[in-house]
Amino acid sequence: MEYLELFFKSIFIDNMVFATFLGMCSYLAVSKKVSTAVGLGAAVIFVLLVTVPLNWLLDQYILRPGALAWVGEEFASYDLSFLSFIMFIATIATMVQLVEIIVEKFSPSLYNSLGIFLPLIAVNCAILGGSLFMQSREIATIGLATVYGLGSGIGWFLAILAIAAIREKIRYSNVPAPLRGLGITFIITGLMAIGFMSFGGMLTGGDEETKEAPKEVAVETSEIEKTKNKETKIIN
């Protein structure tokens, strides 16, 4: 249940584009065609799926204060957390280089259409944000970190795929001249963000009601017991 909740939460509620507005450069630049949006979205899924659990291991066994205790007792007091950004970016750059080689080898047309934005995944704030959110939210296990990376990648993929499909359609629509291009794209993005925010009640509303109900019952029963005790004292 915990894995499933984190998976859907990272896709819909904590969506990288619509909740935190990360990765907007690639989101706006590569979303003119569905084919290129699918290619870049798949690359982002792969990079997040690999880098988030790898950076979780780095954080747990190297970077955290006292994480080097497994090496020896004399290293238990070391704190390498100041290297988090460097280590995370190095891991991401390595994976992006691997993705670039694979895409160039098996899909030269996609490689040419993505252009400079494929190697720029290494500095995509959505990719780095996935690892930093994993660290700040203190995700407990590598399994949860993997699920979070996969869900975040799918959320970004759905966002760029949806806006690319809409932009292909509105190309033939009568959009007012001042709003053509990025103007209408920003408006649609805001409306989509509002739509994705509505998914928040799926995972939070029911839990809050079930948590509050037992408390109310407990308060009522305690008040009933108090009145009963007062009545018995008066009778005695």
Image (cartoon, rainbow, N blue to C red):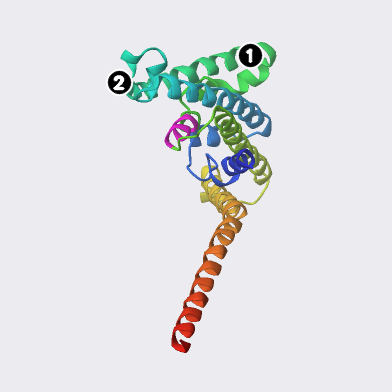
Q: CA distance from mark 1 to mark 2?
A: 41 Å
Q: State the image coordinates of residue 111 (x, y, percent, origin top left).
A: 62, 18
In the rendered image, which quarter is residue 210 located in? Answer: bottom right
Relative to 216, say whether 79 is above or below. above
- The vertical placement of 227 against 60, above or below, is below
Question: What x and y, as percent, mark residue 137?
Answer: 45, 38
Q: Position of residue 27 (x, y in %)?
A: 55, 35
187, 73: nearer the viewer: 73
- State which tag comes first along the sequence, 1 or 2: 2
Furthest residue toward bottom: 235
Q: Which residues are magenta?
A: 130-136
Label ID, residue 77: 2
Which SS does the magenta portion mostly show? helix
Q: At label 1, which amino acid type do we have?
A: Ile
> Which of the two marks, 1 or 2, is nearer to us in this view?
2
Q: Does 189 appear above or below 94?
A: below
Crowding at label 2, few (<14), some or many (≥20) Cα neighbours within 10 Å? few
Q: Which residue is depicted at the point 51% across and 15% down? A: 94
User: What kind of residue is marked 2?
Assistant: Ser
The mark tally for this picture is 2
- Residue assigned mark 1: 102
Residue 202, relative to residue 158: is it above or below? below
